Image (cartoon, helix red, strand yellow):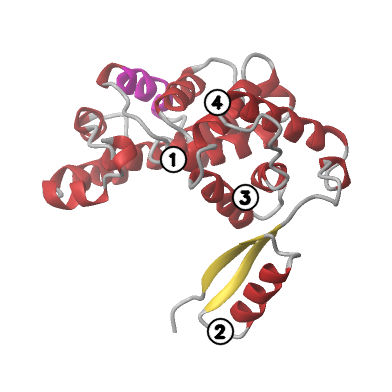
């Protein structure tokens, strides 16, 4: 039996939200993965998230709304703060991902992505590694070419914790845009260690980069990995597998964001 389809419900506390929840509960092919609603009756987000998480959420939402063009300047979106908070701070990865997908389906996407990028500019990236990793996760659904450039810089930046470079590498197959051959060469020069220095984190990062190169048709990077004597045979074989795929199969998996 296939796994049930996961459903995220917006306006979950309203009459329609309750009706949708009841319908999902009655269908064994569906399951509720996340619920969203207004933070409180006044629209203030503080009732949902206090402290630093609430402050960060408020800052991102304000930057997003300031970047939007709208006819009614008095318009206030009470749901957006809730979704942004869940995208960044919910402890369950699936909920964070579904929240990002919800934003991706709205006109907020580029503005939220830009606001998230601003959050990890400068020294902020080192103050909360978990938060930075969650932003990189969100880029997988929201990021465009500008965020791809940021991810590339994070991978090659000296002195960053390995957890950040591994998370950035995992983003390369999902964030929008394309990476130039020169940038790929720089990324691989940093991420392929000398013989004897391989570890689990290195392998995880290189697997992500191979997927990212394969899914975006970065064949020069794949050939570099395939021919490198410093790369273990299993990774060279993975790069060779991507290169051997017929073009029409790889094209079918290429997201429009990468074209």
**Residue 114 shows which numbered tag?**
4
Q: Is residue 25 above or below residue 204?
A: below
Q: Which marked residue is nearer to the observer: mark 2 or mark 3? A: 2
Question: What mark, if any, has residue 27 been given in the picture?
Answer: 2
The residue segment tinted magenta is 183-195
- Using the numbered discs, state the Cα–Cα distance from disc 2 to disc 3 in whole angstroms: 24 Å
Which residue does the numbered mark 1 point to in the structure image? 203
Residue 129 visible, this orientation: no
Label 4 neighbourhood size at 10 Å, few (<14), some (14-19), many (20+)?
Answer: many
Which mark is drawn over residue 235? none
Q: Report the Cα–Cα distance between label 3 and label 1.
A: 25 Å
What is the distance, in whole Å, between disc 4 and disc 1 at their CAs? 30 Å
Q: Earlier in the sequence, mark 2 or mark 4?
A: 2
Task: Say whether disc 2 or disc 3 marks the residue closer to the N-terminus.
Answer: 2
Task: Tell me the SS state at disc 1.
Answer: helix
Tell me residue 182's x, y (percent): 28, 16
Compared to residue 156, the image places residue 1 above or below, namely below
Is disc 2 surrounded by few (<14), some (14 to 19) or many (20+) residues within 10 Å?
A: few
Q: Earlier in the sequence, mark 3 or mark 1?
A: 3
| Residue at the spot of label 3 | 96
On screen, residue 187 versus residue 142, left or right, reads left
What is the quadrant of residue 258 in the picture?
top left
């Amino acid at each position: 039996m296939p796994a049930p389809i996961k459903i995220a419900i917006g306006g979950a506390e309203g009459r329609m939200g309750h009706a949708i929840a009841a319908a999902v509960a009655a269908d064994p092919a569906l399951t509720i993965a996340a619920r969203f609603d207004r933070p409180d009756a006044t629209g203030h987000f503080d009732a949902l998230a206090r402290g630093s998480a609430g402050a960060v959420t408020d800052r991102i939402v304000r930057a997003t709304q300031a970047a939007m063009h709208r006819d009614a300047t008095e318009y206030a979106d009470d749901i957006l703060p809730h979704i942004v908070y869940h995208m960044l701070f919910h402890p369950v990865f699936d909920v964070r991902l579904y929240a990002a997908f919800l934003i991706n389906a709205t006109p907020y996407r580029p503005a939220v992505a830009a606001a998230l990028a601003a959050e990890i500019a400068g020294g902020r990236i080192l103050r909360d590694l978990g938060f930075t990793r969650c932003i990189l996760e969100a880029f997988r659904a929201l990021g465009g070419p500008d965020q791809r450039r940021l991810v590339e810089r994070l991978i090659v930046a000296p002195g960053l914790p390995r957890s950040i470079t591994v998370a950035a590498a995992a983003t390369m197959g999902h964030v929008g845009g394309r990476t130039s051959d020169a940038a790929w060469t720089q990324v691989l020069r940093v991420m392929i260690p000398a013989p004897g220095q391989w570890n689990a984190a290195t392998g995880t990062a290189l697997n992500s980069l191979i997927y990212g190169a394969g899914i975006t048709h970065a064949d020069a990077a794949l050939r570099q990995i395939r021919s490198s004597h410093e790369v273990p045979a299993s990774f060279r074989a993975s790069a060779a597998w991507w290169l051997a795929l017929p073009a029409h199969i790889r094209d079918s998996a290429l997201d429009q964001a990468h074209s």
